[in-house]
Image: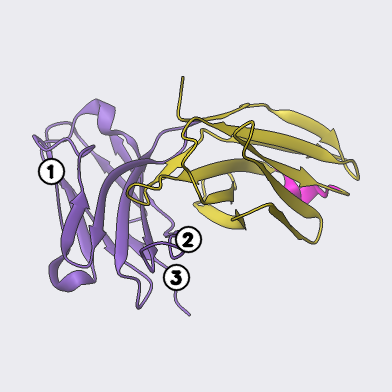
Chain colours: A yellow, B purple
């Protein structure tokens, strides 16, 4: 089993819809979690940090479920500009190294 | 505030040739990372620096890859000789470092093509 797993998608979602995807991790001692957004042929950019029970930033909500060892990202009222690949990263407690998922591709259709 | 700077943005070389990538991190960021990213995959750590010290280079193929971070600021990643399988995007990232300071900021990357 990979340390961090994501559904590669693509998720094809109509504009205005709500979409959610998960990221599962295997190391139960992990403390910090991140969602990054990566546009085609661009670098990953931080979308949200998820430190405790989750957080919300506008249309984006990130949740952490420690019991089941996954984090989720919810996007409400999706926009065409939300089309991208969403990478999750999990911090190892031992050395603060980030372990990255392979990303979930999201396509918002008009 | 300036972000992470990398150069070159693109590089095309023939196999067995050497190649070098340069990174300038965000000012004040003590931790610097070199990642490799293949299409459809997440970044894979090659080496992590805390100031001048390479604290994690376990995934760096040391027979052909080398890196340095002189004076704890800029860093250079070198491949010699390059192989076809080295074609990928090489990303540099930086962070403040330590617990609660691990938010990483990436440069635009260097897209390497080995022919």
| Pointer 1 chain | B
Question: In what element is the residue under mark 1?
Answer: loop
Residue B3 badge: 3
Examine the structure image and report whether residue A19 is included in the region drawn in magenta: no
A80 magenta-colored: yes
Residue placed most toward the observer, B57 or B43: B57
On the image, which quarter does residue B28 sit in?
Answer: bottom left
Q: Residue at x 55, y 49 (%)?
A: A33
In the picture, measured across the screen, residue A47 lies left or right of residue B95, that is right
Left/right placement of residue B19 relative to residue B102 reads left
Mark 2 falls within which chain? B
Is B43 or B100 nearer to us in this picture?
A: B100
SS label for mark 3: loop
Please, which residue is most extreme toward the top here? A1
Residue range of the region highlighted in magenta in the rendering: A78-83
Q: Which residue in the protein does label 2 denote?
A: B103
Q: CA distance from mark 2 to mark 3?
A: 13 Å
């Amino acid at each position: 089993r990979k340390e961090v797993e994501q559904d590669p998608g693509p998720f094809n979602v109509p504009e205005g819809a709500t979409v959610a995807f998960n990221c599962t991790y295997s190391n139960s001692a992990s403390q910090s979690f991140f969602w990054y957004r990566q546009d085609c042929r661009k670098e990953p950019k931080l979308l949200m940090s998820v430190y405790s029970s989750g957080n919300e930033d506008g249309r984006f909500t990130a949740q952490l479920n420690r019991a089941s060892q996954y984090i989720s990202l919810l996007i409400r009222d999706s926009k065409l500009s939300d089309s991208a690949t969403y990478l999750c990263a999990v911090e190892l407690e031992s050395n603060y190294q980030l372990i990255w998922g392979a990303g979930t591709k999201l396509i918002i259709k008009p | 505030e300036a972000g992470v700077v990398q150069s070159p943005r693109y590089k095309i070389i023939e196999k067995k040739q050497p190649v070098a990538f340069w990174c300038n991190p965000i000012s004040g960021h003590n931790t610097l990372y070199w990642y490799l990213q293949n299409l459809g995959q997440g970044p894979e750590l090659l080496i992590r620096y805390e100031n001048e010290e390479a604290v994690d280079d376990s995934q760096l193929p040391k027979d052909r890859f080398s890196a340095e971070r002189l004076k704890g600021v800029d860093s250079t990643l070198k491949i010699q000789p390059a192989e076809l399988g080295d074609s990928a995007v090489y990303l540099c990232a930086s962070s403040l470092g330590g617990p609660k300071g691990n938010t990483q900021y990436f440069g635009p990357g260097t897209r390497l093509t080995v022919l």
